[in-house]
């Protein structure tokens, strides 16, 4: 028997929808386009005046921001960011082999206070339209959500947890960039949720963080979909951490948990063509109003089977055995 979704049918707040632009966010994202192009900023603009959905972004800032859990999370994020700063670049460069650089970077993970680190050559196709950089490599960072808190999605506690983890990711990116700069290598942090130069999901896939899930987020064997990303751009010759596949694509094709749990029915049952690539896609125009009204939602990553503590690695091993058995 199908489980009833307590948030359906969803009716967007008329005040919010009065601020919606004429242009579809799906069109900005390139849904249905058969030719490749770089991504365009659709939301989380540093200056909301720069995007068509800017008034909806401003409306989001007004939702339950005075709730004690949200205030505490915002204060925690501010403290984390205030505790770090970028040093000047040391005049002499430290030299190491690529593998030694990677070992040193992984050893720095605890001090950076991040849960995952990976490295890959920077593909300029990952940059947003109009963005430029002279850097040749990207370091990706991941920070895991507290499962007990994110499980409250779409409640205030889950929204506060997202703010907390973005604060960790921001501070971690500055620490890693500072670590490189103190060794003579220029480095530039890129942090969310505001849109920067880099589309982080394709970079994270290249760094071995996981595969794209049906809910539009990465799925990682260790942390499921329940983590946030930050990045550092640099030229330091760090060895690659290669992409990993563990059966997510086929799993998502037959799983409907996030699809059924999504209140505005924004998660597609099948893949869609987006800027010339066939991929999992979440309908932006359906998702955004519920996201805005519920502290950033996060239902899809909270209910994802991979996100439950202790499940991902066992599930990946099970899928590997199945693939081996089927040849």
Image: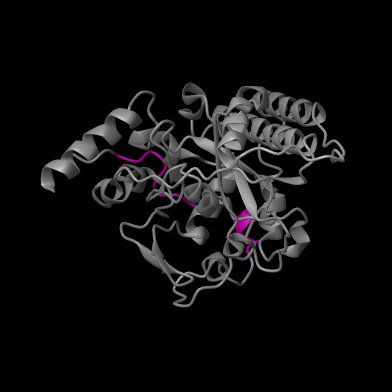
**Horizontally, is 273 left or right of 253 in the view?**
right
Residue 307 in view of the camera: yes
Q: Which of 39 and 54 is in front in this view?
A: 39
Dominant secondary structure, magenta: loop
Task: Please identify the quadrant where the N terminus is shown.
Answer: top left
List x then y, in percent, for residue 101.
62, 36
Residue 88 lies left or right of residue 21; in this view the side is right
Residue 218 lies in quadrant: top left
Q: Nearer the viewer, residue 234 or 57?
A: 234
Number of callouts = 0
Residue depicted at x 59% and y 34%: 100
Task: Answer yes or no: is residue 12 visible.
Answer: no
Q: Please, which colouring scheme is shown?
A: one colour
* For residue 270, side relative to residue 238 (left or right): left
Seen in the picture, residue 44 relative to 78 is either above or below; the reply is: below
Q: Image point 64% across, 67% down: which residue?
A: 21
Q: Is residue 144 magenta?
A: no
90 relative to 203, above or below:
above
Q: Position of residue 83 (x, y in %)?
A: 80, 26
Residue drawn at x 52%, y 51% is 201
Look at 30% across and 39% down and name the residue there.
4
The magenta stretch is 4-20
Instruction: Tell which of 103 and 22 is nearer to you.
Output: 103
Residue 48 locus on image (x, y percent): 75, 57
């Amino acid at each position: 028997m199908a489980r009833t979704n307590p948030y359906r049918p969803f009716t967007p707040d008329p005040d919010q929808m009065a601020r919606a632009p004429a242009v579809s966010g799906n069109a900005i994202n390139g849904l249905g386009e058969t030719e490749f192009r770089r991504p365009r900023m659709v939301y989380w603009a540093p200056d909301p005046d720069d995007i068509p959905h800017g008034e909806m972004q401003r409306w989001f800032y007004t939702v339950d921001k005075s709730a004690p859990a949200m205030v505490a999370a915002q204060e925690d994020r501010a403290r984390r960011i205030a505790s770090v700063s970028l040093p000047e670049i040391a005049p002499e460069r430290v030299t190491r082999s690529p593998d030694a650089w990677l070992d040193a970077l992984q050893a720095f993970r605890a001090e950076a206070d991040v849960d995952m680190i990976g490295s890959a050559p920077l593909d300029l196709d990952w940059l947003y339209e109009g963005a430029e950089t002279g850097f040749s490599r990207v370091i990706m960072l991941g920070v895991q959500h507290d499962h007990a808190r994110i499980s409250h999605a779409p409640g205030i506690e889950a929204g506060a947890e997202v703010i907390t983890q973005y604060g960790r990711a921001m501070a971690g990116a500055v620490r890693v960039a500072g670590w490189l700069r103190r060794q003579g290598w220029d480095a530039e942090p890129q942090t969310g949720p505001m849109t920067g130069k880099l589309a982080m999901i394709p970079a994270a896939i290249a760094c071995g963080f996981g595969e794209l899930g049906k809910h539009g987020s990465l799925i990682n064997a260790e942390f499921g979909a329940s983590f946030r990303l930050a990045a550092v751009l640099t030229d330091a010759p760090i060895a690659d951490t290669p992409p990993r596949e563990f059966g997510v694509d086929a799993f998502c094709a037959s799983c409907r948990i996030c699809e059924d749990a999504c209140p505005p029915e924004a998660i597609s049952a099948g893949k869609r063509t987006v800027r010339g690539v066939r991929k999992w896609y979440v309908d932006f125009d359906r998702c955004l109003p519920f996201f805005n009204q519920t502290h950033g939602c996060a239902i899809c990553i909270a209910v994802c089977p991979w996100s439950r503590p202790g499940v991902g690695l066992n599930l990946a091993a099970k899928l590997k055995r199945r693939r081996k058995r089927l040849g």
